[in-house]
């Protein structure tokens, strides 16, 4: 696993073998060097102060052997043993046909069944939902794990293909090198064939001519003299390849005049810096010598403060939060907030219409699998000390289960913020100073989609707030150019981006992440209320000319809940339970608080926009329907856009006092800048789900303040 091969492995994105090797490495790393440790004064717990910047990656916490896992909860993911059973069933179902498994996950039981289930009850029948391909056809199967019964669902009306498997990608990335014309083209550019690495990019969909076969567009880079080969594109060469046969269909070569960008300055590893390491003189970490305040019961049930929810990794969504409930401090009851929440689809369109770029309109969840691309997290750097890690069990393309260790982490966060505070001013003569620390619980995963990294946090607060945060970092995918200075660019010439370094353009693009939020506020039947804020005139009845007035409208049908955000015509958006009111008579509810808003500027009829039509609005509300989960469509790869949330919502079903699903799209416009080179500093945004009249009063009045002598203080072990 040296040099070139190691790099190739990196972007085949995690073969199982690599993971096993990685785990083996972790288990055998030497114990910490004592001089690097800090000791807590309040007890004898060791607090390591190591950092990856200074040393090797920290040992991952030991994960247990999953072969004997059993499910405990109706929503628990399929275990290794269950997947093995399903694999046998699939094998006999397809008989002699060659097949590939693109998804093998638990088929969630009916909502009513899950809601009725209580700990100690037998589990409802365990079923697997399988997406497979055989004989050039998509299959959607439900397999009963115990009986082996298979139900086949008709999906012939849905265009597109299931997500590409890791094996698909591994099979295809060497395809260009089997082509003599490709080799010649590369050699003509002065690149050694042994330095070439090709990445499989989904082709989008741009017309019926592309139908009938699974296509991939490979773009190639040179790995010479850098770990950051993304910054050394062999510009303009696109190798269109058949994913099923690895046959090279066409080689487009439009960049002969474009030099390969230099390697100098592209590496981002500390080992490549020769100016000396910058390090804060005093190490920082959050101390928790007695361990965290949350528990994970039966592998998937997270309990912290007043929250309780089910958490599982998912190959497509990343993580799924289910049955999120919060305890009411007044009654002690666990109250339903959200039945299920997850990232449903992503859309990353690049804004360059040229031949080698126009198709770059990625739908990362449906095309690649947001969870499949989430690799093992690095303890202490990806998640703080005292984080707990959750492994994922995913299926390879032959249906064999494998373990993705440490894919999700759970940790408590205290960043010195206040949950609430007040100081009474001296003029009232009262001496009051009340302040409370804000501690929260974070669930985190990081998807590394080739060049880009998406950090997704679900953060639960004691006051009932759920904050969803998405952070973008990693490497901007760049375009080679002959320019080395902006003074060479003609006045009206569009370079579709920003010149980041010699011969490198960061192309303008967007990132959208659409969240499925099945809110069930104190029950299934909820309504969506547009709490419109409007200017009202006093018409001479007051010295004031105007004021802001609240006007609430309940959305009757889905179309009334297709929401485009407007700064100068603002609203709040509430999901309420009209059947349950507080003591003073307000319906209980939660609101979605938008942030990170961006609207797509593509034409609604542009094929990428039709396929990712979830970006037509920032908020949607649909009638709950178990088979409407993926807002860009079940088969997003080369989809035409006839199975999207736009189509479902346009059915205009009634949504008042019904079981409804809220969808929110977080967006980022990204005009790259030089600071994004050679790796991008993290950019974050998010949205909140916040209680509105859900509690009778501020639910965290009884939180205790911090007192100095109750908190741990760490000092260097060497001087202790
Ligand atoms: C292209 O080059 C690679 C790497 O040198 C080599 O393995 C392959 O056989 C070549 N392909 C053809 C068709 O010559
Ligand atoms: C409230 O908003 C609705 C829908 O926009 C509008 O029809 C109605 O006139 C408004 N009511 C008032 C009192 O402004
Ligand atoms: C549920 O969703 C599927 C897929 O969009 C659709 O075919 C079906 O008609 C929907 N059912 C209802 C009751 O809306
Ligand atoms: Cu970006």
Image (spheres, grey):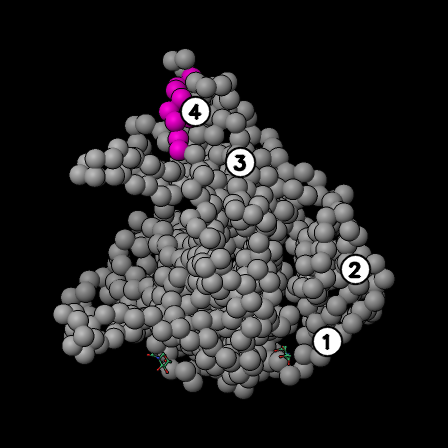
- The alpha-carbon separation of the residues under discs 4 and 2 comes to 49 Å
Q: Which residue is mark 4?
A: 710
Give how far apart the Cα atoms at labels 2 and 3 are.
34 Å
Crowd class of label 4 (few under 14; some 14 to 19; many from 20; radius 10 Å): few
Part of the protein shown in magenta: 705-717
Q: Foreground mark, 3 or 4?
A: 4
- Helix, strand or loop at mark 1: strand
Q: Can residue 102 be seen from the camera position used here?
A: yes
Q: Secondary structure at mark 4?
A: helix
User: Residue 337, position in %: x, y?
Assistant: 54, 57
Q: Are marks 3 and 4 in contact (CB under 8 Å)?
A: no
Label 2 vs label 3, nearer the camera: 3
Q: Please tell me which of labels 4 and 1 falls first in the chain.
A: 1
Question: Nearer the N terminus, badge 4 or badge 2?
Answer: 2
Of the residues under marks 1 and 3, which one precedes in the sequence? 1
Q: CA distance from mark 2 to mark 1?
A: 19 Å
Circle 2 sits on which residue? 125
Q: Which residue is depicted at the point 85% across and 62% down? A: 147
- What kind of element bears circle 2? loop
C-alpha gap between disc 4 and disc 1: 59 Å
Residue 187 visible in this rendered orientation of the protein: no
Furthest residue toward left:
543
Q: Which residue is mark 1?
A: 153
**Location of mark 3 (residue):** 293
Mark 2 or 3, nearer chain start: 2
Count residues near mark 2 (Cα–Cα under 10 Å), then give few for <14, some for 14-19, many for 20+: few
Question: Is residue 625 magenta-colored?
Answer: no
Front-most of residues 199 and 153: 153
In this view, the residue farthest toward the top is 720
Work out which quarter of the rendered image holds the N terminus and state it: top right
């Amino acid at each position: 696993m040296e040099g070139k091969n190691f790099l190739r492995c990196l972007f085949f994105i995690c073969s199982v073998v690599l993971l096993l090797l990685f785990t083996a490495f972790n288990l055998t790393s030497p114990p910490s060097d004592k001089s690097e440790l800090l000791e807590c004064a309040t007890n004898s717990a060791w607090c390591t102060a190591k950092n990856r910047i200074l040393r090797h990656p920290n040992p991952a916490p030991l994960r247990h052997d999953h072969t004997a896992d059993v499910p405990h909860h109706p929503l628990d993911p399929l275990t290794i043993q269950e997947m093995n059973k399903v694999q046998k069933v699939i094998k006999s179902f397809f008989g002699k046909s060659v097949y590939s498994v693109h998804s093998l996950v638990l088929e969630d039981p009916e909502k009513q069944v899950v809601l009725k289930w209580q700990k100690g009850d037998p589990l409802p029948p365990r079923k697997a939902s399988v997406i497979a391909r055989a004989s050039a056809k998509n299959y959607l199967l439900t397999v009963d794990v115990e009986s082996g019964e298979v139900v086949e669902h008709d999906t012939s009306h849905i265009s597109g293909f299931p997500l590409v498997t890791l094996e698909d990608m591994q099979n295809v990335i060497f395809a260009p090198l089997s082509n003599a014309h490709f080799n010649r083209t590369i050699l003509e550019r002065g690149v050694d064939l042994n330095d070439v690495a090709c990445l499989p990019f989904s082709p989008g969909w741009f017309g019926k001519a592309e139908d009938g076969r699974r296509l991939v567009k490979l773009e190639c880079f040179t790995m010479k003299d850098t770990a950051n080969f993304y910054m050394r594109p062999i510009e303009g060469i696109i190798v269109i390849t058949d994913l099923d046969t690895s046959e090279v269909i066409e080689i487009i070569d439009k960049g002969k005049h474009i030099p390969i960008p230099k390697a100098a300055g592209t590496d981002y590893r500390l080992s490549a810096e020769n100016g000396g390491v910058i390090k804060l003189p005093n190490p920082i970490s959050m101390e928790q010598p007695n361990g965290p305040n949350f528990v994970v019961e039966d592998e998937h049930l997270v309990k912290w403060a007043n929250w309780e929810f089910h958490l599982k990794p998912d190959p497509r969504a990343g993580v799924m939060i289910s049955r999120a409930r919060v305890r009411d401090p007044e009654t002690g009851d666990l109250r339903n907030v959200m039945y299920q929440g997850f990232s449903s689809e992503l859309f990353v369109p690049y804004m360059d219409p040229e031949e080698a770029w126009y198709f770059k309109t990625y739908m990362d969840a449906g095309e690649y699998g947001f969870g499949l691309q989430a690799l093992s997290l690095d303890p202490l750097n990806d998640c703080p000390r005292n984080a707990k890690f959750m492994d994922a069990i995913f299926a390879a393309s032959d249906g064999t289960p494998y373990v993705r260790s440490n894919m999700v982490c759970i940790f408590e966060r205290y960043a010195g913020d206040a949950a609430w505070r007040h100081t009474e001013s001296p003029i009232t003569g009262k001496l009051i100073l009340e302040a409370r620390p804000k501690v929260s619980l974070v669930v985190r995963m990081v998807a590394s989609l080739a060049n880009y990294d998406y950090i997704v946090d679900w953060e639960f607060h004691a006051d009932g707030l759920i904050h969803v945060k998405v952070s973008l970092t990693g490497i901007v995918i760049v375009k080679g150019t002959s320019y080395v200075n902006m003074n060479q660019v003609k006045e009206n010439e569009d370079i579709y981006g920003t010149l980041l370094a010699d011969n490198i353009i960061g192309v303008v693009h967007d990132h959208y992440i659409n969240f499925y939020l099945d809110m069930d506020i104190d029950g299934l039947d909820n309504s969506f209320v547009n709490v419109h804020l409007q200017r009202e005139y006093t018409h001479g009845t007051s010295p004031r000319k105007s004021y802001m007035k609240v006007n609430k409208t309940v959305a009757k049908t889905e179309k009334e809940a297709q929401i485009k955000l407007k700064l100068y015509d603002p609203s709040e958006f509430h999901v309420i339970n009209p059947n349950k009111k507080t003591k003073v008579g307000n319906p209980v509810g939660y609101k979605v608080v938008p942030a990170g808003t961006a609207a797509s500027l593509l034409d609604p009829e542009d094929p990428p926009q039709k396929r990712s039509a979830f970006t037509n609005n920032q908020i949607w509300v649909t009638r709950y329907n178990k088979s409407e989960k993926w807002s860009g469509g079940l088969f997003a790869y080369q989809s035409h856009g006839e199975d999207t949330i736009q189509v479902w919502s346009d059915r205009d079903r009634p949504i008042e006092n019904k079981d409804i699903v809220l969808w929110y799209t977080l967006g980022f416009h990204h005009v790259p800048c030089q600071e994004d080179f050679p790796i991008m500093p993290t950019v974050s945004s998010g949205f909140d789900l916040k209680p509105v009249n859900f509690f009778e009063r501020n639910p965290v009045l009884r939180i205790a303040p911090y007192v100095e002598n109750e908190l741990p203080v760490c000092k260097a072990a060497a001087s202790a």
